[in-house]
Image (cartoon, rainbow, N blue to C red):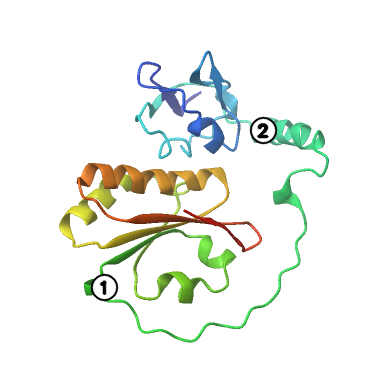
Amino acid sequence: MLRKIITIDQEKCNGCGLCAQACHEQAIGMVDGKAALLRDDYCDGLGDCLPVCPTNAITFEVREAAAYDEAAVLANKASQEAELPCGCPGTQARLLHQQEPAPAQQAATPQNSELLVAADCTAFAYGDFHRKFIKNHITLIGCPKLDNEDYSRKLTEILLANDIKSVTVVRMEVPCCGGMEQAVRTALQQSGKIIPWQVVTISTDGQILEEI
């Protein structure tokens, strides 16, 4: 069938492996030190791998390819998880504890010039998100998995057009959120500005794993 699917430029690929980590369907693997599309029917065409590639080696193309086989992807994941002692952590049941709502805060204004770039699910995972992260920040929310956008280009324009004093990236621990971090890194490089920035990683059970 004719459908949209990724293609990887082997000359541009630097072998970092970020795309393979970001591909939840495991359609991408490393072959002889380069990223390669292993199976057409594992590629869903959503492009989680695109934003994490630092060399822009991955693009979409429309060509004859096997249809995306979700059942095969799930079976492959189940087979691999069965080999783990406790299975995939993301499939485990969790007990959610209700947290006290944070007090209302005055909204930030453009003059604050403190920029927060956050994955949309972080606000749901971390109960004190508004007080700890949004307070006194101009906030940009997105999802590198679901949004078919070039975040780095838009962020570069924002950095060039505004006096941004710092940038905070809040992401989840899942691989696809690496696209958010990489987009900010690329935008900072393209802007030519020296702006302090940090990355905060939130776990799937709502804990701060690291702040770097």
Name the spot of residue 11 as percent of width and height, x first.
Answer: 36, 16
Secondary element at tag 1: helix
Disc number for residue 165: none
Q: Is residue 145 visible?
A: no
In this rendering, the answer to whether 47 lies above or below 61 is below
Name the spot of residue 55 as percent of width and height, x first.
Answer: 35, 29
Q: Nearer the viewer, residue 82 or 59?
A: 82
Q: Nearer the viewer, residue 142 or 111?
A: 111
CB atoms of marks 1 and 2 within 8 Å:
no
Residue identifier under label 1? 112
Q: Quadrant of residue 80?
A: top right
Q: Is residue 81 left or right of residue 166?
A: right
Residue identifier under label 2? 73
Name the spot of residue 27 as percent of width and height, x first.
Answer: 57, 28
Q: Is residue 48 left or right of residue 107?
A: right
Q: Nearer the viewer, residue 129 or 141?
A: 129
Dot 2 alpha-carbon crowd within 10 angstroms: few under 14, some 14 to 19, many 20 or more: some
The amino acid marked with disc number 2 is Val
Work out how far the residue at label 1 is from the one at label 2, CA to CA, in angstroms.
Answer: 46 Å
Name the spot of residue 90 as percent of width and height, x first.
Answer: 70, 50
* Residue found farthest to the top: 32
Residue visible at 50% across and 28% down in the picture = 17
- How many numbered dots are placed on residues in this image? 2
The amino acid marked with disc number 1 is Asn
Secondary element at tag 2: helix
Mark closer to the chain start, 1 or 2: 2
Residue visible at 58% across and 72% down in the picture = 127
In this rendering, the answer to whether 110 lies above or below 64 is below
Q: Is residue 107 left or right of residue 101?
A: left
Residue visible at 47% across and 49% down in the picture = 146
Dot 1 alpha-carbon crowd within 10 angstroms: few under 14, some 14 to 19, many 20 or more: few
